[in-house]
Image (cartoon, rainbow, N blue to C red):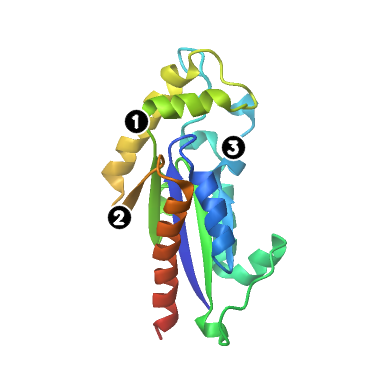
Amino acid sequence: MKTLVVGVGGMTNGGKSTLSRSLHEQIPNSCIIAQDSYFKDDSTVPVDTNGFKQYDVLDALHMDTMMSDVDKWRRDPASFLKQQGLNPVRTTPSVDKEVFVLIVEGFLIFNYRPLNELFDKRYFMEIPYDVCKRRRSSRVYTPPDPPGYFDGYVWPMYLKNRQKMMNMVSGIEFLDGLKPKEELLAAVCTDVSQEIESLREKD
């Protein structure tokens, strides 16, 4: 049994969740762990000097719980899939040649060093400021974004977090989120499939 850990990061509303779900549908023996599932309760998230909730920092997330789930998958991916209600798909006659793929998706996955060190492949979705702002404004959040939140907090924090990521991480493939979804999926799926085949061929 072999494993492959794929990170799909990127800015808010950049298309990372859509790509991750589509990739999961295409890749046998895969599952997704999404960082957004690990936000702390709203009442515990601090407020900055402008009155904006500080969601775009690692401290706003239960990263220890997320890492625990990632470790569960790493120890026994087949059992993890079954616990998630997903049945492993036998893709080759030999169990030792099977490859299980974990897709980790989130906006700060590459900024958390213990998690970043586990990735075999890293992809980062990007879109321009104006497109990002327009998409963000069309989404409904709980709690909702207060007036001025995007320009006063979300975008500045994205730039800050991106710079931190660039300073500590290498081997990231940047993806243009404006490209057709099908084109992005085909490119990433081909790349990941090649990694899977390479793992299968190793002794």
| Count of numbered badges drawn on the protein | 3
Query: Gap in Å between the C-alphas at discs 2 and 1?
Result: 19 Å
**Is disc 3 in contact with disc 2, using a CB cutoff of under 8 Å?**
no
Q: Which residue is mark 2?
A: 171
Q: Amino acid at mark 2?
A: Gly
Most foreground residue, 18 or 167: 18
Answer yes or no: is residue 3 visible.
yes
Distance (Cα) linking label 3 and label 2: 27 Å
Task: Tell me which residue sits at (55%, 63%) in the image.
Answer: 26
**Vertical comparison of 51 with 99: above or below:** above
**In terms of depth relative to the viewer, which is nearer, 38 or 29?**
29
Q: Is residue 163 above or below residue 156?
A: below
Q: Which mark is residue 39?
A: 3
Q: Nearer the viewer, mark 3 or mark 2?
A: 2
Quarter of the figure that contains the C terminus: bottom left
Q: Nearer the viewer, mark 1 or mark 3?
A: 1
Residue at (30, 55) in percent of width and height = 171
Label 1: which residue?
Answer: 159
Q: Position of residue 52 (x, y in %)?
A: 51, 17
